[in-house]
Structure formats: structure tokens, C-alpha cells
Image (cartoon, rainbow, N blue to C red):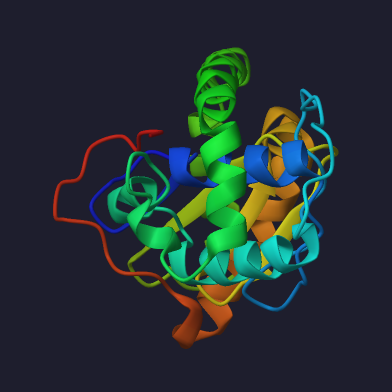
Amino acid sequence: MRGVGRWGVRPVMPQALLLALHLRDAAGLHPPTSPAVPDLPPLDPPVRPAATLPGAEEAGRQWARWWAGAFPGGPESLTSLLPPTFPGLRGMPELRGVAELGIDEAVAWTERARHLERRVLADVPVALFETTLLTRVERELGRRLRSFTLDVVVLPVRGAGAWETPAGPVISLALRADRDAYLAWLREQLLRAGGTAGRTRTPPPEGAGPAVTG
């Protein structure tokens, strides 16, 4: 969504989360879910699974702990998964073993995922539709929305899905690629932002330009 100084939507696809999801799928991990760790489907395109590793059950629990602490996946989260020291995996020996075996393939896969993301965003432009939607929602509410920025984590997982976490929403790339479904989801987010002050996001800087993906 284009920022106009008082509102905006910023879709992001953090590399740290892509790497973590690839490690999860390649190792066949089944992490426990929680409000902070949604039950995300497998990656799409799918990942070729490796042989099941010893300690996979414990590695799955460690993966969920890492995800809950790392989401939404900023630079420190990315560094935490990278060799040679894997600093964010201290005290998680089983998950570190998974990362040591699979990080190179995960890095290569994320490059393909980003190419797919760029293609989807180029093929399905929505800035004008988002602006029109905001106008309609404000008309429906009978007032202007408070200033906010909504950070949306977009992940290339199977199906057109959306998940709420305490740190913000997650949607699948397939949902973002379906303009009508995406706008229907966004409408609910805007109504929530307009109806519940506690769910509005941090205002963007004055005069912010177009939102970017990164």
C-alpha cells in the first residue's frame, strides 16, 4: 500500500524466516504450535526432504523456540542462523545440526523464492486498489482511520492462507497473488485498525514514500 504520511501497508518476506522454513521442511520437523508459532503449511515450491535426522523431535521444539523469538525476522534473526557460529542456536544442538547440514541448500532456495515474490508483486499490482479500499472502509466507519503502518509478513507457503500472531499478521504469497482475496483480507485488517485502537501500528514517518518489499 502506498504510504501517504498517515497510513501504509508494508509487505515483507524476511530471509531469516525463509531459511528457517526451508530447514523445517527439509529436515521433516514438526514444531509445536502456539499463538506465536502458527501452523504454517509446507513451502511452495516444495522442498525436497532429506533423511530424518536423529533428534528431530527435539529439533522441532527448538525450531519453535527460535521462531517465537526471531519473528518477524529482522537482520539479527538472519545472522542468528548463519555459519560458521550460528549464534542464535546456542543451547539448541539438535537444531544447529539441522542448520549445519542444510543451510547452503536453504540459502539457494530463498533466492528462487525471492524471484517468485518479485514476479507476483509485478504481476498483481494493488496500490490503487488498496487506496480505494481504505477510502471505502473510512466511509463505512464514518470517520478517518488513525495513522498506522501495518507490517505484513508474506511467506511462500502452500495455499491462500492468513495467520495472526502477537507480533503481526502473516499471509501466504498465494493470498497476496489473489487480488480479490487479498483485498478482502486487508479490509478486515483495516476495519480492525479502525475499530480497535490497540491494534493500530506505529505511524510511518511524515511524508513516507511508497511501501517497499524487502
Q: Is residue 208 left or right of residue 158?
A: left
The tally of labels here is 0
Name which residue lies at 44% across and 74% down.
200
Q: Is residue 49 visible?
A: yes
Left or right of residue 161, residue 74 in this image: left
Q: Height in image: 105 above or below 31? A: above
Q: Extreme left residue here?
A: 206
Q: Position of residue 48 (x, y in %)?
A: 80, 24
Figure check: 189 above or below 110: below
Vertical arrangement, residue 97 with respect to residue 137, above or below? above
Quarter assignment of residue 141: bottom right
Observer-nearest of 32 and 205: 32
Give 159 or 18, whichever is nearer the viewer: 18
Question: Which residue lies at the image location 41% right of the left edge and 33% below the top edge?
Answer: 213
Q: Visible in this render: residue 142?
A: no
Location of residue 96 with respect to 173 vertically, above or below: below
Task: Say whether residue 88 is left or right of residue 157.
Answer: left
In this rendering, position of residue 90 left or right of residue 169: left
Measured from the top left, where is residue 198 in percent x and y? 46, 86
Q: Quadrant of the N terminus?
A: top left
x, y percentage for residue 137? 60, 60
| Occupied quadrant, residue 212 | top left
Q: Looking at the picture, tell me which residue is in the foreground, 56 or 35.
A: 56
Q: Provide residue 120's location: percent of width, then percent of height.
A: 62, 19
| Residue farthest toward the front in the current orientation of the protein | 54
Quadrant in which the C terminus is drawn? top left
